[in-house]
Image: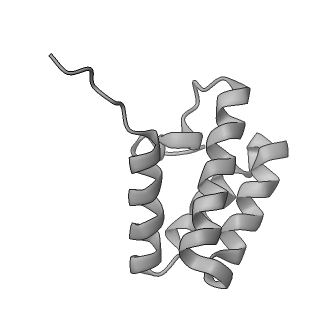
Amino acid sequence: MIAALDQWGPFRPDLDPAERLARLRSLRAITRLCCGPRGERLADELHRAERDADRLPAALDALNALAALDRRQVLTSFAALHRTICEPR
């Protein structure tokens, strides 16, 4: 079970499976680019979660285990990639 506070991005329970897969893959790519080998555990858990949604809590734990700067870079990059773009008035 994932706490309500952590239900964002690929960890939202109401996501379509194809959208969850896309978000997991983008988060894994961001992790590889931002963290390199320091993000190996997270990248592995995200890869496992692509095939088995029961692995999502383990992936979230791996994300939370990153060093503060690595975690911040991953989260801000993911947020920038998936932000809602507003139409100009």
Q: Residue at x 63, y 76 (%)?
A: 39
Quarter of the image holding residue 28? bottom right
The residue lying toward the viewer, choosing from 85 and 5, is: 85
The residue lying toward the viewer, choosing from 44 and 60, is: 44
**Which color scheme does this rendered protein use?**
one colour
Q: Residue at x 39, y 68 (%)?
A: 72
Extreme front residue here? 88
Residue 32 position, x and y percent, is 65, 70
Extreme right residue here? 51
On screen, residue 45 versus residue 52, left or right, reads: left
On screen, residue 82 versus residue 24, left or right, reads: left
Q: Quadrant of the N terminus?
A: top right
Residue 48 position, x and y percent, is 81, 55
Taking 82 as reference, is 49 above or below it? Answer: below
Q: Residue at x 72, y 28 (%)?
A: 18
The residue lying toward the viewer, choosing from 60 and 24, is: 24
Q: Residue at x 65, y 30 (%)?
A: 19
Extreme left residue here? 89
Q: Quadrant of the C terminus?
A: top left
For the image, the number of numbered tags is 0
On screen, residue 33 versus residue 54, left or right, reads: left
Taking 1 as reference, is 30 above or below it? Answer: below
Quarter of the image holding residue 54? top right
On screen, residue 39 versus residue 79, left or right, reads: right
